[in-house]
Image (spheres, rainbow, N blue to C red):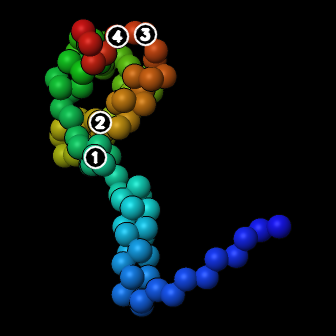
Amino acid sequence: MAKLMLHTFELSDIQKVVEEVLERKLKSFIPREQDSLKLLSRKDTAQLLCISMPTLHDWTKNGTVKAHRIGNRVLYKLDEVKQALNQINTGRGLSC
């Protein structure tokens, strides 16, 4: 049989507990980094992937890495570069 325990709590105590639980849960939904907003230049992207600029151009053309044009600049989103690095799985990048 399950035990039933009854306690009397002050409204302020209940509010405090609920606020703490909600705060902890909401923190898990907040992104830790704004990787999706961080844009990298071609040079920075090539260095991150440990490849040359011509190789980055080839990877961009064949769709391995997705590029974004803003005006006449070619930029790469950091989170997309990290995803491409995971898919490439060459053992390079971030440790070259």
Please report the residue visible at 16 percent of the width from the left and 23 percent of the height from the top: 43
Disc 3 to disc 2, how far (Cα)? Answer: 18 Å
At label 1, the amino acid type is Glu
Say if mark 3 contacts mark 4, CB within 8 Å. yes
Residue position marked by numbered label 3 in the rendering: 90
Provide residue 13's location: percent of width, then percent of height. 39, 82
Helix or strand or loop: what does disc 1 sit on? loop
Under tag 4, what secondary structure?
A: loop
Indicate whether 80 appears above or below 44.
below
Look at label 4 and name its amino acid.
Arg
Q: Which of pointers 3 and 2 lies earlier in the amino acid sequence?
A: 2
Residue at which label 2 appears: 78
- The Cα atoms of the two marked residues, 3 and 4, are separated by 5 Å
Mark 4 or mark 1, earlier in chain: 1
Q: Are the residues flagged by discs 1 and 3 in contact, CB closer than 8 Å?
A: no
Disc 4: CA contacts within 10 A as few (<14), some (14-19) or many (>=20)? some
